Structure formats: C-alpha cells, structure tokens
Image (cartoon, grey):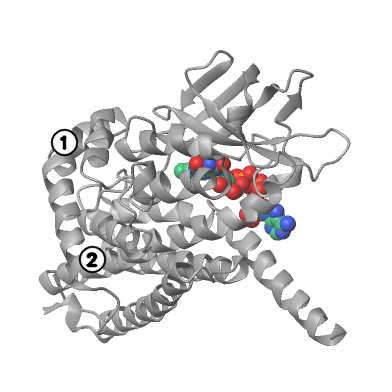
Amino acid sequence: MAMIRNHYEAEHEAFRRSFRTFLEREVLPNRARYREQGMIDRAVYTRAGALGFLCSWVDEEFGGLGLADYRYDQIMQEEAAHSLESGMWMGALNRNAPPYIAKFGSEEQKRHFLPRLTSGEMICGIAMTEPDAGSDIAGFKTRADRQADGTWVLNGSKTYISYGIIGDIFVVAAKTDPANPRSLGLFLVEAAAPGFRRGRKLEKLGFATQDTAEIFFDDMVLQPIHVIGDPAKGFDYMRNGLAEERLTTAGQSLPWSRRAIELTLDFVTERKAFGQRLVDFQNTKFKLAEMLTEVEASQAFLDHCVRLFNAGQLDPATAAALKLKTSEVQGRVVDECLQLHGSAGYMQEYPICQLYADARIFRIFAGTSEVMKIVIARDLIDSRAGTTAS
Ligand SMILES: Cc1cc2nc3c(=O)[nH]c(=O)nc-3n(C[C@H](O)[C@H](O)[C@H](O)COP(=O)(O)OP(=O)(O)OC[C@H]3O[C@@H](n4cnc5c(N)ncnc54)[C@H](O)[C@@H]3O)c2cc1C
C-alpha cells in the first residue's frame, strides 16, 4: 500500500532489518512493563548504543559510525512506527540535542561527550521550554551569569523535558546578558553535578513509555567545557538546530500516519455493518483514499527535505513547512482512522487508540503549528522584501 518510492539503497534496507530485529528482541517483549513504569529500561539504550543505533551520524573519530546520511535516521523512525513503540524515540535521542555539540562544540567537548552519547553511556536531552515561556524564546528566564574566574552560574528551571528523568546531560538554553534579551547561550548541563534537580515525572496523554519532566538549576557552577560555542549566539544555533529537529519530528510523524491507515484498513476489512464490510461503504473508501493521498504527497515532501538536509541545504522555513504539513496530516489521519473504528478505536486494546493519543503532541512540540506559520510567513515576506530591494 504505497507509491513506488526510490528513496533507499540496499544498505539502508539492511540497516532497517537490523533495527527491526533490535526492536523485536530488546524492546517489544517488555512493552507492558514499560507502559506500567512509564519508561523503557535504561539498559535498552546502552544496548542500542552497542549496536550502533545511537548517533550513528557522529564521525568515527568521535565514536560514531560516520553515517551522516539522514536516511539511516529516517529508517529508524519508520521502524519505530511499524513496531507501534513510540517510547524508543530515536529522533529525539539522536537528532535533537547531540548535533549542537557536533556542529558548534569545541574539539574538547566532542572528544568528551560524543563517544558517551554513541555508546549510550549518556542520554542527552534538550532543555528550552520553561514554565512561563515555550514558543516565546525571548521570554526565557533561566540565566547563566559569567563569573570573574571564567566559570558560569546557572539558575532557573525547564519543563516538559524529554528524558528529564533518565537523561544524563542536557543542552540548556539560558540568557547570558541581563542587558540584552537576544543574548542566549547553550550550555551542557550534567545531571550528576551539584545544583541540578529533577522534578516529578509528568503524566501525559500519550508517549506512555517515554519520560518527560521538569528540571531545576540552583546556583549550578558550569566550567568552560560546558559552554557550547559563543554564549551570545544561542538564537543562531537554535535556528539551525530547530530545522533539524523539525525534519526529525516530521520523519517520525509521517510513518505513524501511514501505520494508522494500515491498521484501519485491517479493521474495516474485518468489521461488518448493515450486512457488508465497512470497507465496502463508499465513505470508507473515500476516506482511505483521501488519507493515503495526503500521506503520499507529504512523503514526497519529506523525502525531498531529507535529500536537501543531506546536501546541507535544508533551510528553517522549509523545515517548518514540512513539520506543519506532516503533523497536521497526522492529526487528521488519526482522527479519521479512529472514527472508522467506531468505539473500538477508543479502547486501549486497539492500537489506533494509542496512535491517536501519541499524535496530539506533534502539532505542539518542536514549535507549534502557529509558530511554524510565523516562521514560513516571515521567510516569504522577507524574500519579497529582498527581491524588491534588489
Ligand atoms: C511530550 C512532550 C515533550 C516535550 N519535549 C521537550 C523537550 O525535550 N525540550 C523542550 O525544550 N521542550 C519540550 N516540550 C515542550 C514543547 O516544545 C513546548 O510546550 C512547545 O514549544 C509549546 O510551548 P508552550 O507549551 O509554552 O506553549 P505556548 O508558547 O504558551 O503556546 C500556547 C498556544 O499559544 C499559541 N501561540 C504562542 N505564541 C503565538 C503567536 N506569536 N502567535 C500565535 N499563536 C501563538 C501557540 O501556538 C499555542 O497554541 C515537550 C512537550 C511535550 C508535551
């Protein structure tokens, strides 16, 4: 059930098989327990690292496999959807926080941190959102104050942080100049260091096997090795990093839509009403056709953006448009698919129920749909202004 897609080579498909086997052997047998405890065992991440699934894009000299081709990450996102396991969130592990170290970090930071991320010894989260400011980055209150001896003192809190409970380090955005609200720094904050505190594990609508939490910094002393790049350039770094995070969010979102359609096709083929199968109603056929068409069109857009990313050409506005499109499609698809299930779709025993709950956050995290529209419109208007001026 898919368009012909000439996106992958034989080596990608081999990688797919090994990642699928890893999920089948190491993750899926314990799903019920992971749901109960609200997270996957820490040891599974170490195993993922040993098998080369963590930050495999990192250069070999820093412990990675040097698989810079984004399609390897895309495959893991597709396989996570195939398995129906949202907790093994490879996109967030591999592509949200660690690239800040590789792209903007010092040689010393790369040598120290990247091998620990690829092995699974350390899990690295990204900590931007605050209790009083999510979309409004300029409204962040977390502060890092430079001291005379070259160290920094970090104070503040972050919330809704993925891996807030099991994470070992976090890339934290903090204001670095009280006189200049645009001066933002990115800091590598180690959870084992004095002054770091974890809050409660937050109870969520979806993503039942993955932890989200508040984290706090109380007079945390950070050394120069904890400062990423120029401590006044965090906005620029995030603009770059968020494009990658949005590609990754889309890469995860779209396979879940496809999976929802597959599961719904199974269901409507079995279930009967008014003496015929649900799939024989014209409404069902039209809904399936509309959804598949939306998914296939989005797939072409996603694959195009992956190729742009591989060529170093994915710009923030295109990444925002992709994230907007795929997450909005996902919202419509899971809603229609659940509707085609009737009340069965509202029951936890049917996977569409989980897909529906998991989908809701995609229009919010990594920047809301409204923020995506602001990014896209700003680029459009600026490009017109640029054309007029020239
Ligand atoms: C499961 C989960 C995991 C997450 N993981 C992380 C993580 O790892 N790291 C991290 O930093 N954050 C994380 N987040 C937080 C998430 O990225 C933010 O919640 C999100 O960016 C939105 O911020 P907010 O909740 O403060 O909403 P707000 O910014 O308060 O927005 C509320 C509403 O107002 C709208 N709005 C805001 N500004 C405008 C505007 N200018 N124009 C029009 N409408 C506007 C928004 O679109 C939204 O609809 C996670 C959240 C969840 C639920």
Where residue 341 sits: x, y (%)? 25, 64
Where residue 187 sits: x, y (%)? 61, 34
Give the amino acid type for the residue marked by disc 2 in the picture. His
Q: Between 291 and 116, which is closer to the camera in this rendering?
A: 116
Q: Which residue appears at 23% of the width and 68% of the height?
A: 264
Name the image quarter holding the N terminus.
bottom left
Q: Is residue 361 visible?
A: yes
Q: Is residue 3 above or below residue 375?
A: below
Where residue 185 sits: x, y (%)? 69, 39
Q: Is mark 1 within 8 Å of ligand 1?
A: no
Q: Which residue appears at 49% of the width and 48% of the height?
A: 99
User: Which element type, helix, strand or loop, lies under badge 1?
Assistant: helix
Badge 1: how crowded within 10 Å, few (<14), some, or many (20+)? few
Give the amino acid type for the residue marked by disc 1 in the picture. Asn
Q: Label 2: which residue?
A: 12
Q: Is residue 154 above or below residue 386?
A: above
| Residue 36 appears left or right of 176 | left
Q: Residue furthest top?
A: 194
Q: Label 1: which residue?
A: 30
User: Label 1 vs label 2: CA separation?
Assistant: 27 Å
Q: Is residue 367 visible?
A: no
Where residue 231 sits: x, y (%)? 71, 38
Q: Which residue appears at 63% of the width and 27% of the height?
A: 224
Mark toward the start of the polypeptide (1 vs 2): 2
| Residue 205 appears left or right of 350 | right
Instruction: Tell how many labels.
Output: 2
Q: Which residue appears at 63% of the width and 18% of the height?
A: 220
Q: Between 15 and 369, which is closer to the camera in this rendering?
A: 15
Q: Between 32 and 170, which is closer to the camera in this rendering?
A: 170
